[in-house]
Image (spheres, rainbow, N blue to C red):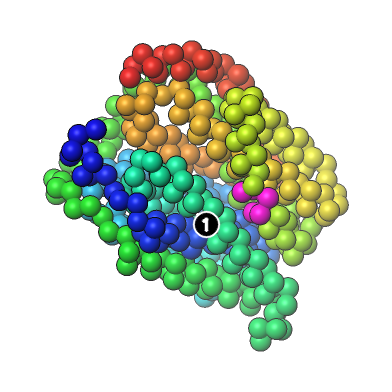
Amino acid sequence: MTTSDRNNMPIYDKKKVFSWALYDWGNSAFATTVMAGFFPVFFKQYWSGRSTAVESTFRLGAANSIASLIIVVAAPVLGAIADRGSVKKRLLLLFAFIGILMTGALFFVGQDNWIMASALYVLGLIGFSGGNIFYDALLITVANKKKIDFVSALGFAFGYLGGGLLFAFNVFMTQKPELFGLSGPAEAVRISFISVALWWAVFTLPLIIFVKESKEKREPFQMKTIRNGFKQLLHTFDEIRKLKIVFTFLLGYWLYIDGVDTIVRMAVDYGLAIGFKAEGLVLALLITQFVGFPSAIAFGKIGERLGPKTGIFIAVGIYILITIWAYFMTLEIEFYLLAAGIGLVQGGVQSLSRSLYARIIPRNKSAEFFGFYNMLGKFAAVIGPVFMGWVGIISRDSRTGILSLIVLFVSGALLLSRVNVAEGIRVAHELE
């Protein structure tokens, strides 16, 4: 390591690290309370209450897919901007502001106004996802090479805890609205949207105050920055396309992770469509939230002993069983059991996919290849929600809609079976 490299490495500063991680603590409330929890419930019962179950499912699926597609299209540009050095923090705050403002604005949307609710949700999701691009880019600012794995994991841990705690409080508020002087559960849900906006804003403050970016000298942002972003994307894709094992894995990953993300976003909507009560469904999400973190650690041990590919197969297999079970379930207690099952594999399939990918790519191009991997992850949940809603519309049965996700899981697993990890590692080493 050169003297210059040593000088450019960030000092491990606990205040900066915890300030950075607290942003995940704050914005994860959007993922739990809004995206997975209350928005699907309120959308179906309050904003789209005059529509049929399959129609509201299709509308919610379309909103999720539109937001994901916008992020995918914008990702190369956002990535190019993030690489400019001293604008990551400002752009994170811009997207966070959009997400916070749109989330708080959901409080004011009137009954049956599903179009306005959808528009605000899409913009909020763009703010959430766009902000995360720059949040991830700031990791190298707060962590040196020795601590980067720990700091990254700390961010995930804070996200699980922070998002879960506020969600638990909001669930309690909807169950006991009279304790808070509220007229009923509907007002409690609307107040919950405000609480997420405030929670997100408050826990962004430490990042604003304590996380400073390195003042790297870069060319000023111009239109060519946008062009270069798309050129970089095409160059990376061309390299990946030539590496058959990496390309096959990414295609399989895209399919099965699309199924995973669709279940996360559409599970509550599906439960409502087949007649379960909203209160029980939201409580089930808490089970998933708090089971998910320790299970990811357990799957890490499975990956160490049996290999990440085997661990992913186990997780995808469980997801297929969960989908089949969801098609046949009739009792609300079954939804709780399914929530626990999802929690057991959700973190594991994500963490093992990342570690397998890291094994089969050249180390000297890890940033470039992981940039494409992260963009592909954002592209997940574009097909699944619309596919599920479309099948439900065609068949006029929400149960058939959820069963259609098996296509994504099976296709992804079949492609994964064609990935020769040992050969991928050998080729990656030759290219380093």
89 left or right of 67 in image: left
Picture layout, residue 89 above or below residue 354: below
Picture layout, residue 222 above or below residue 128: above
Q: Quadrant of residue 208?
A: bottom left
Instruction: Find the residue positioned furthest to the right.
Output: 331
Q: Residue at x 40, y 44 (%)?
A: 148
Q: Secondary structure at mark 1?
A: helix
Q: Which of these two is toward me, 270 or 17?
A: 17
Picture layout, residue 323 above or below residue 415: below
Relative image position of residue 26 (x, y in whole percent): 48, 63
Relative image position of residue 269 (x, y in whole percent): 68, 54
Q: Which of these two is toward me, 431 or 397?
A: 431
For label 1, the residue is 158
Q: Residue at x 71, y 84 (%)?
A: 178
- Whether residue 284 appears in magenta in the rendering, the answer is no
Relative image position of residue 315 (x, y in whole percent): 66, 34
Quadrant occupied by the C terminus: top left
45 left or right of 18 in image: right
116 left or right of 349 in image: left
In magenta, the rendered stretch is: 288-293
Quadrant occupied by the N terminus: top left
Relative image position of residue 335 (x, y in whole percent): 78, 51
Would residue 394 be seen by someone viewing this image from the given angle? Answer: no
Q: Which of these two is toward me, 132 or 118?
A: 132
